[in-house]
């Protein structure tokens, strides 16, 4: 208790130093005032009375110093002394110091990185004024954050809860400033977007609601600061300039401030244009399409005093009204409020779960590191027991010695924390500029460490310093100087389970857990790379383009698409060329409700399925390598004048028609009532993520169901680079004004999450393994060095090598075995969670189990190798002579 | 004015404890009270009181709190803690024993040895 009190007192005086100083000053001043009052009463005038009072008081400065001493307040001096001493001690054992600092730097660095991500993505998502009252709205049951434009208008105008409800949609367009046309990404936003968010322009002005007078009435464009900086080289005269977006003239009216990068975390836009002009960008008329419900994300600040619950009730009453008024278009209009930035819970849920899990793992790493360093410290304390005893005998207090030990541990943790933090800042800088998916422009992970991150790193460093510094406390407190000086440092060779054993066991369990998780993830990823996706991305090139960005509309679109296919087919080495709107696993997708043939009431609640929709050319299946199971593929005659047809996948056939053979020739209905006849069935595939269950999908001929978004699959065994060059010139010959990109067909988008999960778990696993090695090494080396004399005697008495090794290393190895088993079991339990992110992540896999066991055995061998060598090379004669 | 005696080392703390035991006082009040109960026979430089006060607070024998004095000035008042009371009793006893012993020793006439 006394120790704690005194510690608290000291810490209090440290932090309240200036306050205490001021208080002391005040007290002494008041004393002189009182004395002066008395003297004044005895007849002196005030000035003389004060003078006399000061003289009688004596040397103020001297007494103040004495007061400080009385408080034990030479804190800073003692601290400096302790630091100097600690530095000397640490310099004497550079190996230990280095290992300790590296261990902590890694552990704290890992925590800082993960916390920075947590901080940026979840705790403080967007740089918007008054972010705490900013909410996005989301549909209750399917967690869709999207609304149709007319619904949005109703929500905006009828609600009483939001100070202003804005809406936006991510879009792409071809930008032509007179030079090369480029594809740029931006937001189509409601007129009140900037006003509702409370953003002020950096340059020029923002467009607003008064600019909007119906379709295509506001051809204005606001640039983001970074795009203005990168594309227009900070040219201030850009305001007022007219540029062409998807062939239509738009006037640049302003530039957004540098720290505002849109309201979605991962997709930072290049520009903002009014939603009312959407038709000019992509030919889609949304202003009156109430059924187009997967379009806009809405968000806004709640009015002061309105609680989220009130706002939800308000929105729900509007939702009920909309459901009643527009039964054909609107269903399931129950709302919840979410933090904007991650497209609501759609992306937010998995990201949150993943980052939180990562944070937990990082915490485990730090805990393992602390356990590791704690046992190292305890071992050192035991080695230093003679020094401690001497100091105690010379009159040092135990508090003073503990203080010095803590100075040492905190010093190590602060240095380690600083190194770790610097490393993590460097890493985060790389991460922020990283474009994980080259196919999707302007996709970033904006993680900039801020004060929060620094504080957390500092706190973690201090906490871990005290944590592992506290391990040897009991040992030091119970030191009996007389015994130790008398007999020398003979450690008790007890059979009892010590704190050190426990720490090492826990640490090994944590490490084995991390190794298990990372192996499960790696194995799952490897397996998912070699599974069947329902298409074959290898040996295929993909052209990305969007015909609307070059002004193609209606029939001209199909004509151009046919010309592109024909031109690419003529390239030597191109085996087949197919067109698809959004390729599966490409990160973008379209889904549509479908109805059975018999359904007459096409309200959403009667939908038979919600299927992925692909607009394809006749040769797509061949180019993509998708296998046809029954029926036929499309021909060029399945055009506007022919009856509507579709190819569906197996899952679709089972779900709607019962079986594959049953499906051929049958009909189903699209949401607009058109009947579509099934002409073929293809194999199931993966469409959105590798981990998904089989999903229904339908393929429609692009001549009947046009799409401006165009991906051209070119299957060829030619060298990809050569092929890409030929493809580029071929397409440019057709239309030099069409922006497009060419690259190999990858599934980066679909593999992004498993890649990230595997990479982070892999890093954690490697760190866990390193910690296990250092931990076991420390323990084994310590136990060998403690028992060198005993081992020497054993050898003299004729012990075999095996016996010596057993005596020296049995305990660390036993701990290793126990810890590994515990960690493995924990890992098996935990990887159920992993299965949601990484396809086919299962720990019930002999390879994984074997891998973990092998890894831990190797780690154990690696860690005990040097101590074992040392135990075997004991020279008994020398030992006995010297000790 | 009575002639004043120099304080023996260590006795100031005892005097402070004694003065404060009669009720909470601020620093200047303690000095006055010591003067009063010792018949102004002891010479204490006024500032010397404060290191003693801080020491006693730190040892947990006194506790201090800010309040308002009789003439409406702010002042820091000191009072005895339970440990302070105990210490005062012990110190008084041991001082009395010491004083009696020293007094007896000095009063002894050499011929009585």
Image (spheres, coloured by chain):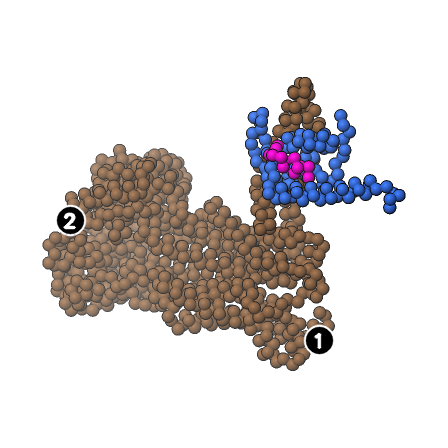
The residue carrying mark 1 is A877
Say which residue appears at 70% left-offset and 24% top-offset. A52
Q: Position of residue A828 (x, y in %)?
A: 40, 67
Report helix, strand or loop for mark 1: helix
Say which residue appears at 19% left-offset and 55% top-offset. A593
Q: Please give the chain letter of the residue carrying mark 1.
A: A
Query: Is A137 rendered above or below residue A629?
Result: above
The residue carrying mark 2 is A328
Q: Nearer the viewer, residue A280 or A142?
A: A142
Left of A366 or right of it: where is A710?
A: left
Based on the picture, tell me whether residue B20 belongs to the magenta stretch: yes
Q: Position of residue A362 (x, y in %)?
A: 46, 57
Query: Is A846 rendered above or below residue A602?
Result: below
Residue lying at the far right of the rendered structure: B111
Name the magenta segment's main secondary structure.
helix
* Magenta span: B13-26
Report helix, strand or loop for mark 2: loop
Left of A389 or right of it: where is A275?
A: left
Picture quarter with the C terminus of chain A: bottom right
Chain assigned brown: A
Chain assigned blue: B
Q: Nearer the viewer, mark 1 or mark 2?
A: 1
Left of A598 or right of it: where is A467?
A: right
Within 10 Å of disc 1 (Cα), the crowding (few <14, some 14-19, many 20+) is few
């Amino acid at each position: 208790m006394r120790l704690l009190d005194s510690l608290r007192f000291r810490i209090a005086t440290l932090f309240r130093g200036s306050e205490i100083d001021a208080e002391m000053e005040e007290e002494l001043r008041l004393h002189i005032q009182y004395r002066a009052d008395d003297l004044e009463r005895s007849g002196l005038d005030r000035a003389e009375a004060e003078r006399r009072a000061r003289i009688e008081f004596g040397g103020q400065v001297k007494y103040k110093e004495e007061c400080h001493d009385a408080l034990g307040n030479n804190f800073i001096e003692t601290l400096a002394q302790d630091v100097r001493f600690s530095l000397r001690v640490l310099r004497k054992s550079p190996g230990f110091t280095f290992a300790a600092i590296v261990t902590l730097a890694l552990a704290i660095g890992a925590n800082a990185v993960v916390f920075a991500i947590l901080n940026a993505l979840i705790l403080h998502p967007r740089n918007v004024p008054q972010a705490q009252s900013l909410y996005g709205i989301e549909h209750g049951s399917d967690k869709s954050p999207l609304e149709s434009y007319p619904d949005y208008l109703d929500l905006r105008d009828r609600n009483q809860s939001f100070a202003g409800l804005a809406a936006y949609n991510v879009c792409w367009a071809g930008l032509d400033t007179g030079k090369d046309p480029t594809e740029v990404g931006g937001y189509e936003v409601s007129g009140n977007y900037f006003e509702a968010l409370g953003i002020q322009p950096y340059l020029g002005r923002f467009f607003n609601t008064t600019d909007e007078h119906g379709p295509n009435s506001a051809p204005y464009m606001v640039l983001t600061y970074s795009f203005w900086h990168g594309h227009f080289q900070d040219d201030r005269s850009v305001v007022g300039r007219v540029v062409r977006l998807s062939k239509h003239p738009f006037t640049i009216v302003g530039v957004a401030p540098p720290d505002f990068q849109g309201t979605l975390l991962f997709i930072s836009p290049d520009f903002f244009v009014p939603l009312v002009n959407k038709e000019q960008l992509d030919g889609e008329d949304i202003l009156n399409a109430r059924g187009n419900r997967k379009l806009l994300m809405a968000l806004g600040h709640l009015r002061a005093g309105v609680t989220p619950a009130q706002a939800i009730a308000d929105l729900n009453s509007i939702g009920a009204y909309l459901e009643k008024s527009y039964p054909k278009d609107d269903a399931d209009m129950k709302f919840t409020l979410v933090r904007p930035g991650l497209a609501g819970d759609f992306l937010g849920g998995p990201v949150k779960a993943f980052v939180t899990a990562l944070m937990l793992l990082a915490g485990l790493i730090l805990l393992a590191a602390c356990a590791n360093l704690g046992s190292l410290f305890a071992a050192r304390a035991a080695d230093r027991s003679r020094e401690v005893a001497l100091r105690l005998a010379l009159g040092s207090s135990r508090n003073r010695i503990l203080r010095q030990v803590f100075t040492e541990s905190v010093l190590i943790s602060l240095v380690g924390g600083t190194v770790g933090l610097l490393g993590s800042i460097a890493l985060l800088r790389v991460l922020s500029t990283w474009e994980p998916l080259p196919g999707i422009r302007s996709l970033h992970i904006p993680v900039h460490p801020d004060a929060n991150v620094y504080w957390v790193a500092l706190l973690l460093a201090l906490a871990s310093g005290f944590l592992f510094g506290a391990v040897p406390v009991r040992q030091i407190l119970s030191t009996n100087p007389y015994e130790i000086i008398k007999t020398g440092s003979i450690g008790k060779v007890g059979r009892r389970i010590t704190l050190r054993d426990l720490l090492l066991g826990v640490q090994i369990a944590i490490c084995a857990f991390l190794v298990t998780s990372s192996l499960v993830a790696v194995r799952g990823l490897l397996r998912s790379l070699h599974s069947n996706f329902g298409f074959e991305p290898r040996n295929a090139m993909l052209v990305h383009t969007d015909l609307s960005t070059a002004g193609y509309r209606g029939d001209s679109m199909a004509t151009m698409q046919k010309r592109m296919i024909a031109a690419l087919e003529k390239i030597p080495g191109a085996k087949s060329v197919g067109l698809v709107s959004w390729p599966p696993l490409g990160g973008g997708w379209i889904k549509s409700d479908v109805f059975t043939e018999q359904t007459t009431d096409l309200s959403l609640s009667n939908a038979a399925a919600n299927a992925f929709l692909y607009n394809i050319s006749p040769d797509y299946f061949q180019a993509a390598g998708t296998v046809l199971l029954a029926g036929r593929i499309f021909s060029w005659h399945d055009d506007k004048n022919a009856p509507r047809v579709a190819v569906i996948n197996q899952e679709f056939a089972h779900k709607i028609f019962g079986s594959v053979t049953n499906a051929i020739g049958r009909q189903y209905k699209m949401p607009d009532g058109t009947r579509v006849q099934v002409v073929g069935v293809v194999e199931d595939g993966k469409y959105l993520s590798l981990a998904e269950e089989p999903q229904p999908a339908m393929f429609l001929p692009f001549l009947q169901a046009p799409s401006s978004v165009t991906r051209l699959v070119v299957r060829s065994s030619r060298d990809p680079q050569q092929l890409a060059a030929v493809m580029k010139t071929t397409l440019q010959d057709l239309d030099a004004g069409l922006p497009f990109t060419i690259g190999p067909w990858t599934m980066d988008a679909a593999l992004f999450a498993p890649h990230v999960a595997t990479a982070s778990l892999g890093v954690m696993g490697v760190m866990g393994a390193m910690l296990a090695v250092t931990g076991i090494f420390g323990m084994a080396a310590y136990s060998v060095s403690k028992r060198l004399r005993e081992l020497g005697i054993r050898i003299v008495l004729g012990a075999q090598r095996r016996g010596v090794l057993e005596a020296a290393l049995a305990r660390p190895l036993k701990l290793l075995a126990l810890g590994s088993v515990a960690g493995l079991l924990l890992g098996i339990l935990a990887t159920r969670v992993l299965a949601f992110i990484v396809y086919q992540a299962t720990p019930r896999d002999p390879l994984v189990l074997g891998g973990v066991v092998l890894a831990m055995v190797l780690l154990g061998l690696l860690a005990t190798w040097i101590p074992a060598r040392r135990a075997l090379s004991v020279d008994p004669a020398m030992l006995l002579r010297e000790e | 004015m009575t002639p004043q005696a120099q304080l023996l080392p260590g006795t100031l703390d005892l005097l402070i404890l004694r003065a404060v035991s009669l009720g909470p006082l601020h620093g200047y009040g303690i000095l006055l009270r010591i003067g009063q109960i010792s018949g102004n026979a002891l010479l204490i430089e006024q500032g010397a009181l404060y290191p003693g006060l801080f020491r006693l607070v730190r040892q947990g024998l006194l506790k201090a709190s800010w309040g308002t004095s009789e003439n409406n000035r702010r002042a820091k008042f000191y009072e005895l803690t339970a440990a302070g009371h105990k210490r005062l009793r012990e110190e008084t006893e041991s001082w009395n024993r010491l004083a009696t012993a020293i007094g007896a020793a000095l009063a002894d006439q050499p011929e009585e040895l």
